[in-house]
């Protein structure tokens, strides 16, 4: 299981945790898999309530491997039935704790929990999107949202930035009885530290590329948050430099979202020779490790697990200093660029292709990254938090 001391007392009752997740995709799915693999089944009994989506198969497989039961939510008359499903679980089982993933999941869980008053930990995975409240009823939506969130026991954030963001958006929540807890995110470093020496050549061979082609990896979802539009613009400018014309590729692993729209943009700018679009995969440590560099020009991140993964693999990282991500790349050899700065991104891409010291610095940092970003540290803190408030009633 792990080398973490579970501290479970013999003959003690298990702590029953209901995990609520509207969309178990991307970083949230990874977060659940990374952290909950350390939760001993002798001490914790975990059930996940989640909405079906494009990563349903991966989520089911991940949770089954951890012995976690998954309850899938369907729609009723086109509406998400998660509050009803959560209420049904709370009614039929004596859960000690709700662990919701993100604001919408927290809102749904909070609605269902009004009658049960179960301890509720809301993990913040992102910003409060304007679309949550847009429309003529904006003030009413904000009032109801804030009212429901006031019942949360602990606001848990994976970065300091996200906690500050929530407090700025809803200052009145600071007067609630809730605790505010920062537990930095982490990863399982072993797969990234135990890659074969020929992982790069094998990746290029599998993609049908020349061994000398420089491969940039882009592994975020193709949504505005991830800044893929800046990559397209940076490539458009970089390919005009005869020194790099035809000598690099952008490898993208993504399915759904705005893949079609971005492909159209790439085609419109006559950049198809520079981009390789591949479908999402459940495990990509060998692909990250095989790239010559990883791109993260995000507009915001809750933390940035991909940055941790690249660092543990010793792969050069180019990342923006946006909210959340700037904490994940603090005191690392990352080539840092301002958010939305295409010229800075182009310059960083040029530097990593021409300056061997960038690769050297990342390779040397990898062992330190593996210890610093090991999820066992955050999982231990999360379990301690659950032990402390799991039996508490609101």
Image (cartoon, grey):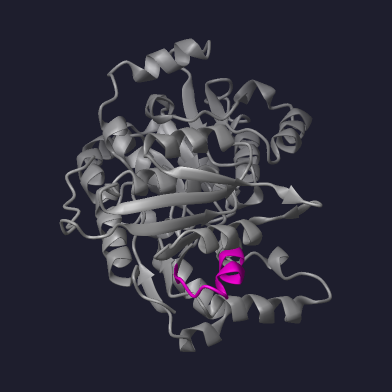
On the image, the x and y values in percent for residue 125 come to: 50, 58
Q: Does residue 309 appear anywhere in the picture?
A: yes
Give the quadrant of residue 307: top left
On the image, the x and y values in percent for residue 175 come to: 47, 89
* Extent of the magenta region: 108-120
Q: Is residue 38 left or right of residue 46?
A: left
Q: Nearer the viewer, residue 23 or 264?
A: 23
Specify the quadrant that holds the N terminus.
Answer: top left
Picture layout, residue 310 above or below residue 196: below
Specify the quadrant that holds the C terminus.
Answer: bottom left
Residue drawn at 75 percent across, 28 percent down: 267
On the image, the x and y values in percent for residue 210 come to: 49, 11
Picture layout, residue 160 above or below residue 236: below
Q: Is residue 268 left or right of residue 176?
A: right
Give the quadrant of residue 240: top right
Q: Is residue 348 magenta?
A: no
On the image, the x and y values in percent for residue 133 come to: 72, 71
């Amino acid at each position: 299981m792990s080398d973490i001391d579970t501290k479970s007392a013999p003959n003690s009752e298990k702590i029953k945790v209901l995990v609520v997740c509207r969309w178990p995709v991307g970083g949230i799915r990874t977060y659940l898999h990374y952290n909950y693999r350390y939760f001993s089944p002798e001490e914790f009994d975990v059930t996940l309530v989640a909405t079906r989506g494009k990563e349903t198969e991966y989520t089911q497989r991940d949770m089954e491997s951890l012995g976690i039961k998954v309850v899938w939510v369907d729609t009723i008359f086109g509406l998400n039935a998660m509050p009803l499903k959560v209420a049904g679980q709370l009614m039929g089982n004596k859960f000690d704790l709700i662990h919701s993933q993100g604001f919408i999941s927290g809102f749904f869980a909070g609605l269902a929990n009004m009658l049960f008053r179960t301890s509720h930990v809301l993990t913040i995975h992102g910003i409060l999107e304007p679309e949550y409240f847009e429309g003529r009823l904006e003030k009413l939506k904000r009032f109801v949202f804030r009212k429901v969130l006031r019942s949360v026991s602990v606001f848990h954030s994976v970065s300091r930035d996200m906690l500050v963001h929530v407090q700025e958006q809803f200052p009145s929540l600071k007067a609630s009885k809730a605790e505010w807890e920062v537990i930095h995110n982490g990863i399982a470093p072993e797969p990234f530290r135990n890659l074969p020496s020929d992982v790069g050549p094998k990746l290029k061979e599998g993609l049908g590329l020349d061994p000398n082609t420089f491969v940039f990896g882009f592994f975020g979802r193709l949504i505005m948050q991830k800044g893929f539009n800046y990559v397209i613009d940076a490539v458009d400018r970089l390919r005009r430099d005869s020194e790099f014309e035809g000598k690099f590729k952008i490898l993208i692993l993504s399915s759904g979202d705005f893949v079609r729209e971005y492909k159209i943009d790439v085609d419109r700018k006559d950049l198809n020779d520079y981009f390789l679009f591949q479908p999402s995969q459940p495990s990509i440590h060998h692909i990250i490790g095989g790239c010559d560099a990883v791109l993260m020009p995000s507009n915001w991140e809750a933390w940035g697990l991909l940055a941790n993964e690249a660092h543990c693999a010793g792969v050069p990282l180019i990342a923006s200093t946006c909210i959340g991500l700037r904490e994940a790349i603090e005191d690392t050899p990352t080539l840092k660029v301002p958010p939305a700065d295409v010229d800075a991104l182009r310059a960083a891409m040029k530097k990593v292709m021409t300056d061997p010291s960038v690769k050297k610095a990342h390779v040397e940092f990898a062992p330190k990254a593996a210890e610093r970003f090991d999820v066992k540290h955050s999982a231990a803190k999360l379990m301690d938090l659950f032990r402390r408030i799991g039996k508490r009633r609101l």
